[in-house]
Amino acid sequence: MKKLLTLSVMFILCLMTFATDFMRIKLKDGNIARYEVDNIEEVDFEIGKDTSIIGDTTAVDTSASPLRFRITSGSTAEVVYSYLYANIDSISIPSKVRIGDKIYNVTSIGENAFNNCRNMTSIQIPESVTSIEAHAFWGCSGLTNIQIPESVTNIGERTFSHCSSLTNIQIADGVTSIGCGAFSYCDGLTNTHITIPASVARIDSCVFTGSNLKSIEILEGITSIGERVFERCDSLNKIEIPNSVTSIGWSAFYGCSSLTSINIPESVTSIKGSAFSDCSSLTSINIPKGVTSIEDMTFYGCSSLTSINIPEGVTSIGNEAFYGCSSLASINIPEGVTSIGEWAFSDCSGLTSIKIPESVTSIKGSAFSDCSSLTSINIPEGVTIIEEFAFSGCNSLEAKLLIYDKGTKCYGWIGDRTKCTNVVIPEGVTSIGKYAFSGWSGLTSINIPESVTSIGYNAFRNCTNLNVVIDNSKDNVEVDNYAFQGCKSVTYLK
């Protein structure tokens, strides 16, 4: 038995001496690959697009980075918010990150990622990033400079809002979308010239609201300037609008108090309300021929505006459109305008004359109130309504309102008896609003036609030298309280 066992062991040893060594590799599909060890000279681990097993030496392991990441797809990840960022003063975002045993491309800086990181002074964004999401750097008041890489196509809402120390920023040519308020209230952009690339196409709402940028260039290709884009940009003194722009949004340049002039291209067909409100240094502006309406408060408070040309295509002038344009000496309202809104020219204290076209049918309340230098104005025959306060406070107009006397077929000045002996409010006017001629102490005589059926509260109050004649032959005239309080005399024709 012992002899048999000895022979068996010797046999096995002989087999091992002449056997070939193999390397066994178990694959993911369960199969086993066998390779002769003697034939293997070198083993290389080649890193291709699939780095899920071996890894990438350029990738940063999450354990070695203070940043936190969220997987967004099978190959991408984004930087996400963490309260631990509060004490970081400088950070470099990696282009690749290893999460577990797999590598992901960092393509996004997530919503609120670095929100209110006031100690952060600098950050480097890699070329792998294509999107910077909403509020990503909101309130980073210590951030002084940032370079947006060419790879970025989207800048979200209020991304850099309230980055008060940011002195320079460049918007890459590849950016196609800039969200509302993206650079709003960036007080440090005082000496910065910013160029908005044509790839953006449309500038959305509030992008630069409250920022102190000095000049900006909008490249050809952009078609729209959204609402409140440059609102309260107090330092903005130069802007170039390309011929591709067709619309300027509501309050787009509201409060740009350093803007002295602006050229609006002929391509623009729409200028929304308050677009240039409180541009107190604006001295002149052109309105393109394609614009058909001057909307509410469009030039409100433009106190340095000395001249403006309203094109023939305009049909309406909105409420408070030129309110407080105190340097405006004269203005031509073209034929085609049918209505002049409330307070449209109120407080235009430098306005000395104005011609209202025959197309106008109504003069709204306070339209010319407090135009203290206005010495001449015509009321065309087609006007049917003069609303409340329409000429209230026009102290220089007391004896010089040019109106048409249908009966005598002549134009004359109120109070000037040498040209017309009987000057009247035009036939066709049906209503005289409250306070319409209140306080015209120089007015001596006026006839009110039978078409007038309503005379408002205080309409002629304190016209101390005025003798009023009212045609009430149809007994249908309604006179409100104090309409003629303080007038010299009132006569009703029956």
Image: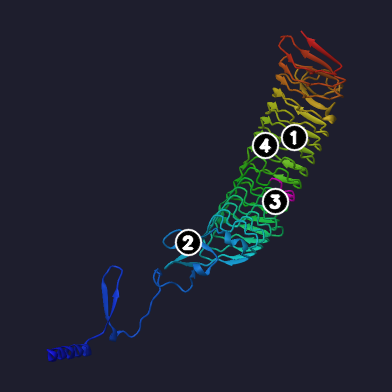
Q: Amino acid at mark 1?
A: Phe
Q: Of residues 293 and 311, which is closer to you in this image?
A: 293
Say the numbered circle drawn on residue 77.
Answer: 2
Q: How many angstroms separate mark 2 from mark 3 (CA)?
A: 36 Å
State the image quarter where residue 290 is shown: top right
**How would you rate the neighbour count of disc 4 (Cα within 10 Å): few for under 14, some for 14-19, many for 20 or more?**
many
Residue 233: numbered disc:
3
Mark-to-mark CA distance, 4 and 2: 48 Å
Mark whose residue sits in front, 2 or 3: 2
Question: Which stretch appears magenta?
Answer: 254-261
Which residue corresponds to the image point at 60% horizontal and 57% vertical from the top-left?
A: 137
Disc 4 or disc 2, which is closer to the eye? 2
> Which mark is drawn over residue 345?
1
Residue extending farthest to the top is 494
Foreground: disc 2 or disc 1: 2
Question: Disc 4 to disc 3, how far (Cα)?
Answer: 21 Å
- Name of the residue lying farthest toward the front: 1
Residue 398 position, x and y percent, is: 84, 26
